[in-house]
């Protein structure tokens, strides 16, 4: 059986049900790297250029973990996943950076996904990958449809204000939760327990109800993002700003926490817009946490607890 490795990092958090189902439906065995841990981070840091942001360093560590265990590693080059919107430039260069930095890699499955292209483009990409496992286009198409259906179930869980069980994050919303706080950040930071230092669990322990961008429908996000005077063409920035605009109008939201990576270009711009917006327009408190590989957990704990005290004082 052909083994396909999928790094548990970056776009994994958004798409893994689709990818896993697609490959398994075509008869492949999917091997995920372990959840991020100190060894994976260390291996990543050793194998990538210093200038990379922490999530990219960690991604390299996940690839290192998989490289001798599988026949292929799936590392899609995500250029655009929404019409007229783009991902971060680092996503575009990942397959090339990996080839340049890590020797003896197995074959990479690295389709370029650019939804600014026209109609049949996506099917061509699906077929480009699927034909490695089956010469039957119908089988590939059915595997893709099944994958999309799994992805839709996964997304539906978010819309019910829950965190999908597959992410193994211990978080169960309860009615006794006194504060509702929006947690903003890339999925590969806030849902990666090691990178986020268990921030969601820590918030839950303080009896905070956590809501995130993923819990809003694309329709709401797009509608809200349009209220920004300039069209936002970075996909993540648009989603984050759309959710800030929406949640800041909700009475029950007590505050916002933004967790981002040091050295992230798109986040430096987005964080600044959020800060100004929340300060000048809505006056909802914001805790801005920037992490890198040297960030200490004690510092995060202290800042979270201080933020919690501030919110509790405000709600009386
Ligand atoms: S968006 Fe920021 S954190 Fe994410 S890969 Fe790009 S630079 Fe890194």
Image: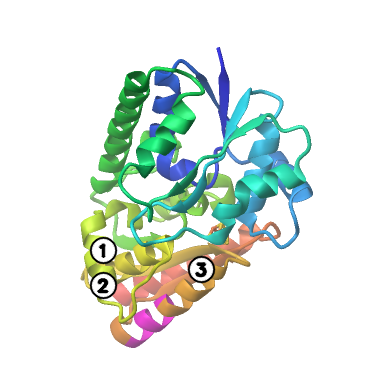
Q: Which residue is mark 3?
A: 267
Q: Is residue 234 above or below residue 314?
A: above
Residue 162 in view, yes or no: yes
Q: Is residue 277 magenta?
A: yes
| Magenta highlight range | 274-280
Residue at 23 percent of width and 50 percent of height: 175
Q: Which residue is mark 2?
A: 226
Give how far across and how far down residue 107 sits, in percent.
65, 30
Q: CA distance from mark 3 to mark 1?
A: 19 Å
Q: Secondary structure at mark 1?
A: helix
Q: Is residue 38 above or below residue 183?
A: above
For the residue pair 230 and 39, the one nearer the viewer reads as: 230
For the residue pair 236 and 255, the one nearer the viewer reads as: 236
Graded by Cα atoms within 10 Å as few (under 14), some (14 to 19) or many (20 or more), the crowding at tag 1 reads: some
Q: In the shown orientation, is residue 57 left or right of residue 121?
A: right
Of the 4 image quadrants, the one containing the N terminus is: top right
Q: CA distance from mark 2 to mark 1?
A: 6 Å
Tags 2 and 1 touching, CB below 8 Å:
yes
Q: Which residue is mark 1?
A: 222
Q: Secondary structure at mark 2?
A: loop
Q: Residue furthest bottom?
A: 280
Ligand 1 within 8 Å of the CB at mark 3: yes
């Amino acid at each position: 059986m052909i083994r396909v490795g999928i790094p548990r990092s970056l776009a994994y958090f958004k798409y893994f049900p689709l990818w896993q189902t697609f490959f398994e439906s075509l008869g492949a065995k999917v091997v995920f790297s372990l959840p991020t841990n100190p060894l994976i981070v260390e291996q990543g840091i050793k194998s990538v250029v210093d200038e990379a942001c922490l999530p990219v360093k960690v991604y390299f560590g996940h690839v290192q973990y998989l490289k001798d265990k599988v026949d292929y590693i799936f590392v899609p080059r995500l250029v655009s996943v929404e019409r007229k919107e783009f991902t971060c430039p680092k996503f575009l260069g990942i397959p090339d950076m990996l080839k340049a930095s890590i020797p003896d890699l197995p074959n990479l499955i690295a389709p370029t996904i650019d939804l600014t292209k026209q109609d049949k483009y996506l099917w061509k990409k699906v077929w480009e990958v699927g034909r490695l496992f089956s010469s039957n286009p119908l089988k590939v198409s059915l595997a893709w449809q099944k994958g999309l259906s799994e992805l839709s179930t996964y997304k539906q869980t978010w819309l019910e204000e829950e965190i999908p069980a597959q992410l193994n994050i211990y978080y169960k919303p309860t009615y006794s939760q006194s504060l509702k706080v929006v947690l903003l950040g890339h999925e590969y930071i806030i849902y990666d327990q090691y990178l986020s230092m268990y921030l969601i669990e820590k918030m839950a322990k303080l009896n905070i109800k956590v809501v995130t961008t993923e819990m809003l429908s694309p329709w709401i996000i797009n509608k809200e993002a349009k209220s920004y005077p300039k069209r936002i063409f970075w996909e993540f920035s648009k989603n984050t700003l759309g959710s800030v605009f929406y949640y800041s109008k909700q009475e029950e939201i007590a505050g916002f926490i933004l967790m981002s990576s040091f050295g992230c270009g798109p986040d430096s711009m987005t964080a600044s817009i959020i800060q100004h917006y929340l300060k000048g327009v809505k006056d909802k408190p914001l805790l801005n946490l920037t992490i890198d590989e040297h960030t200490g957990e004690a510092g995060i704990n202290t800042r979270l607890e201080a933020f919690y005290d501030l919110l509790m004082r405000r709600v009386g």
